[in-house]
Image (tube, coloured by chain):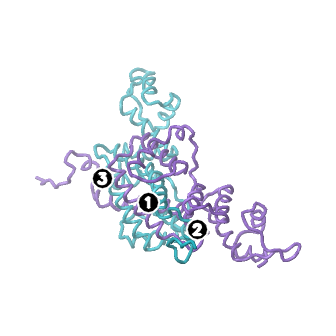
Chain colours: A purple, B cyan
Amino acid sequence: MRVSELVAASGVPLATVKYYLREGLLMPGEASSATQAVYGEQHVRRLALIKALAGVGLPLGKIRTIVGLVDHPADTVFDTLGRALAALPPYPVDGDRAAAGYPRARAVLERLGQVYEPSYPAVAQLERALAAAEDVGIPMTDERLEVYARHIRAIAEIDLELMPTDSVESAIEYAVLGTAIYEPVLAALRRLAHQDIGAETFSGRTFGDFTAPDATPHRQDES
Amino acid sequence: MRVSELVAASGVPLATVKYYLREGLLMPGEASSATQAVYGEQHVRRLALIKALAGVGLPLGKIRTIVGLVDHPADTVFDTLGRALAALPPYPVDGDRAAAGYPRARAVLERLGQVYEPSYPAVAQLERALAAAEDVGIPMTDERLEVYARHIRAIAEIDLELMPTDSVESAIEYAVLGTAIYEPVLAALRRLAHQDIGAETFSGRTFGDFTAPDATPHRQDES
């Protein structure tokens, strides 16, 4: 197809397509004359990937990293996906905690017996999140961690089970987009589960009942 | 204690304390003279709450809503916590989807048989998150939803079990801060669980093995 058809097929404006070509995010078409090139399904697919990555908030430099891994995967699947996932926000910022070796995150991961690569940003992300919980006075406890970790693992397992393995591109695309896009879904589901459980637990209860030493509401004989 | 002692005890600068007093976020002290007031533990506690809420990114107007509910709870526990939690981001933006009645979120919640209050922002949040998943080509499936919902519910249950019930203030504080502060922890734990499961699943595998029709790696006799 010609570039005008690529624009129509992808929904990406011509100026943006040209920009991606110049920046090397989109591979060049096959030259059909000195001034024209022919594009194919791979170009439509690449533009859809770039669009989706931009849509989850990735800056251009990070999108470049990911399409670079699609075109030139690392030696192993693990390294390739790890590097692609490292392109997702939140980006590490605290040299201090890195220097201190992420003590909270390491303690949690060692307790869980999980394999982890400290240079991948999820470790710094966990450290920061645990420190924030401490700061507001609701630090992670063993009891909470045990439940969270067990159920999050089950969620992560289905994520991996559903990963397509037909191509490097679809695996990377699924890993990156699925990780990013399902975090807000899970957050919303948790808030709605709180609401559903709360509706039952607190049904008709006032704070008077709630904070009374005997919290079980019971009817008084009116006499 | 005097205001200078309140500043020392809370770690909140004097100008900020005065600002919170003027804005009505911090209750006035007890006047001890025409120009002086005495503050107590409730003021230290309130400043800690305001600081923590600001720390999770809440704007002043939303902090006002929450401290207002601490001082004047709604009729029921459910309504009070619901209104407090509605002060958390993300804030609803799309009139269009509200008008369309959140079809994706409703379908999910009805499938799960959950009680929900459509005016609470978590419904809009779920709708937006599900639409985003659709947009990038990884729409929610029944299989994924069943696993996600079951395990998120178990997480929500421990959240509710661990809620303090000794006062309105501590219940609201826990509900709001615990909801906000543990979302990034759960997101990081999921990414790290992917890493741990991936390390095992993909151990030593290259994309050659991975995308081969027979994906089980096997050794060829070298001859």
* Type of the residue with mark 2: Phe
Where residue A218 appears, as percent x and y from the top left, is: 17, 54
Other residues around mark 3 within 10 Å, as few (<14) / some (14–19) / many (≥20) = few
In the rendered view, would you say B22 is above or below A71?
above
Task: Give the mark, 3 or 1, whose residue is nearer the N terminus.
Answer: 1
- The residue wearing badge 3 is B161
Q: Nearer the viewer, residue A11 or B200?
A: B200
In the rendered view, would you say A209 is above or below B34?
below
Where residue A83 appears, as percent x and y from the top left, is: 59, 57
Q: Nearer the viewer, residue A118 or B129?
A: A118
Task: Tell me the SS state at disc 2.
Answer: helix
In the rendered view, would you say A208 is above or below B191?
above
Query: Which label was assigned to residue B214?
Result: none
Task: Tell me the SS state at disc 1.
Answer: loop
Query: Which label was assigned to residue B207?
Result: 2
Chain ID of residue with mark 2: B
Whether labels 3 and 1 belong to a single chain: the reply is: yes
| Residue that appears at 49% across and 37% down | B23
> Would residue A151 appear left or right of B101 to someone viewing this image?
left
| Residue at the farthest left position | A223
Where residue B11 appears, as percent x and y from the top left, is: 47, 30
* Type of the residue with mark 1: Tyr
Query: Which label was assigned to residue B120?
Result: 1
Q: Which of label 2 and label 3 is nearer to you?
A: 2
Task: Give the mark, 2 or 1, whose residue is nearer the N terminus.
Answer: 1
